[in-house]
Amino acid sequence: MRRGIAAAVVVLSGVAVTGCAPAGAMSGASSPSPVAAPVAPPPPPAPTDLHPGTNHAYLADAYAYPAADVHAWLVDGAKAANYPQRRIAFLTFDDGPSNSTTPKDLDILRAEGVPATFFYITGPMGLAKVDPAVPHRALAEGHAVCVHSRSHNYHELYPGRRADAEHVVADHERAMGDLRGVFGADFAAGCYRYPGATCPGEGWPPLMRRWPSGASTGSTGTR
Ligand SMILES: [Zn+2]
């Protein structure tokens, strides 16, 4: 106990001398120039932290594929750059998350050692009503999160069965804002799955223009 007290006194004394001496107290000495305290380097990120600029944690770097590459593989086949020499399965889940089902999905994926990509509804049907621990768990356990929709409302997004570019883009922007609200401003996703799971015909190019290589799905594969 004594040692603890003594150490505290030394520290306090040191602070008084170097930082808090009143002006003129050090007679004869020129004004000391302030010495910046050494700044401790930030701690290294944990493997379970979001890799900034992506939609997954650092640990998923080992098996995540850019959605643009996957899109090229689907469109151009073996002629595409980086075409894989082995078969890759992308396991994806739409329409989550939920407080009841998603944790069960995550339990199974963890037991099987399989990463997946979750395409979230971010509005009141999904993310907005879910415990934030659920999406954080998905990311920390090596899965990717992408945008499915905010509203998932076909009448709003595809009035007359034709995609409304303005509504689709606005819905996507709001969904990204929702995801950044959960994962932070560094969250970014280059993949998107239209509600209804397929290209809704005419009028769908707005997101293709945004991502010239394609609004594709899938960003994590099997290990
Ligand atoms: Zn859906």
Image (cartoon, helix red, strand yellow):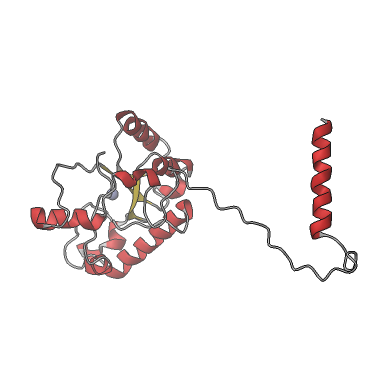
Displayed quadrant of residue 155: bottom left
Q: Position of residue 201 (x, y in %)?
A: 16, 62
**Residue at the image position 31 percent from the left and 44 percent from the top:** 62
Q: Quadrant of the N terminus?
A: top right
Q: Is residue 114 above or below residue 55?
A: above
Q: Name the residue at 29% across, 47% down.
A: 64
Residue 90 percent coordinates (x, y): 22, 43
Q: Position of residue 19 (x, y in %)?
A: 79, 59
Of the 4 image quadrants, the one containing the C terminus is top left
Question: Looking at this view, is 150 or 22 the one in front?
Answer: 22
- Left or right of 216, for residue 187: right
Which quadrant would residue 100 be assigned to in this image?
top left
Q: Is residue 143 left or right of residue 50?
A: left
Q: Is residue 106 above or below residue 179?
A: above
Between 13 and 174, the residue placed more toward the observer is 13
Residue closer to the observer: 13 or 133: 13
The answer to which of 50 and 10 lies nearer the viewer is 10
State left or right for residue 155 relative to residue 22: left
The residue located at (43%, 38%) in the rendering is: 99
Residue plotted at (17% across, 54% down)? 82
The quadrant where residue 47 appears: top left
Disc tally is 0
Q: Position of residue 149 (x, y in %)?
A: 33, 55
Vertical arrangement, residue 146 with respect to residue 28, above or below: above
Q: Residue furthest top?
A: 111
